[in-house]
Amino acid sequence: MSSPGYIYVLINYSMSNLVKVGKTSRDTESRAIELSSVTGVPTPFLVAFDAHFNDCDEAEIYIHSKLEQLGYRISENREFFQAPLKEVIALIVEAKQLLQSQATSTENDSTVAQPNEEIQDASPEYPWSEIEALATYYYNSENYEEAYSRFKQALAKGSPYAYSPLGNMTLRGLGCLEDEQEALAIFEAGVQAKDDRCCADLATYYFAKDFMTGAGWFEKYLESGKYLHPATVFHCCVNFVMFEKYSRYGYPFKNLLEKYRPVFSPMKDSIISYAIKQINHVTTNYPDMKPLYVQVAQDIKKLPE
């Protein structure tokens, strides 16, 4: 019996030169968030690449065995591999093409493709996948010029997910010239392309300049239901509380939590787990910010399940 699902590749800035290759029947972003909330993981896992398989159990066995044959596995019972990201992605694309060919040949009695056949650089369905994965890798390695160049290439190939990182890099001058207006244009284009992280980016930008505009973008992010990462949600909440008290509109944080309780409640544990790490960080580096972070975390913690 087949088990449809995704094979994913996760990277983590705290785990240099390691990638995690696993499977899930859910969306891969949720799996990354789940793993990031585990105690002892200092930085979040990021989805570098994923691919859907009609039988992800079979695909995982094939991919893990290939990686093990190449000497990349660091432990028999673990999903971590010390392998170049590009090779791992190419192997997953190879597995997808091979297993699909086998399935087709079973149905049509045609010739089965061999594993060592020449493969394309990326899945035809997502031609930007490999480039975007490499861009994320370079970004987390702080090679910003290379990351910026790769994200631009991914965008040119039609990626709907490159807007947010490109906008943030342009806003901060990472790997490119700092340009506030261009960054805003990228974020707005991202919203149109359904990269809803750009709503959170615009919220963060506007909170200090025009609180209600920022709050409006934050609400759009929460309403999107997509890419709701605990770290992004928590930092938006911190900015909301920090700048609301300076605004003349009067929009208490507790009102926001109540309005979007169906969004916050399922994420509560993941948000609190991330918040604890951030509170420890600001206690050491920015002690004046600690009361604010604690207040936001406590308000979220009080939400009913």
Image (cartoon, rainbow, N blue to C red):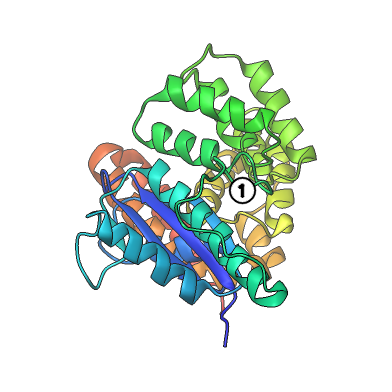
At mark 1, the secondary structure is: loop
Residue 126 in the figure: left or right of residue 46: right
Q: What residue is at 35 percent from the left and 58 percent from the top?
A: 20
From the viewer's perspective, is residue 96 above or below residue 4? Answer: above
Q: What residue is at 37 percent from the left and 42 percent from the top?
A: 289
Q: What residue is at 27 percent from the left and 44 percent from the top?
A: 17
From the viewer's perspective, is residue 165 above or below residue 46? Answer: above
Q: What residue is at 69 percent from the left and 27 percent from the top?
A: 186
Q: Nearer the viewer, residue 252 or 24?
A: 24
Residue 31 placement (x, y as % from top left): 48, 66
Residue 11 in the figure: left or right of residue 104: left
Residue 245 placement (x, y as % from top left): 59, 42
| Residue at the outermost top position | 177
From the viewer's perspective, is residue 148 above or below residue 230? Answer: above
Question: Which residue is denoted by mark 1 in the rendering?
Answer: 123
Q: Nearer the viewer, residue 289 or 35?
A: 35
Task: Work out which quarter of the rendered image holds the N terminus and state it.
Answer: bottom right
Q: Which three-letter amino acid code belongs to the residue tagged 1? A: Ser
- Tell me if I can see residue 126 in this picture: yes
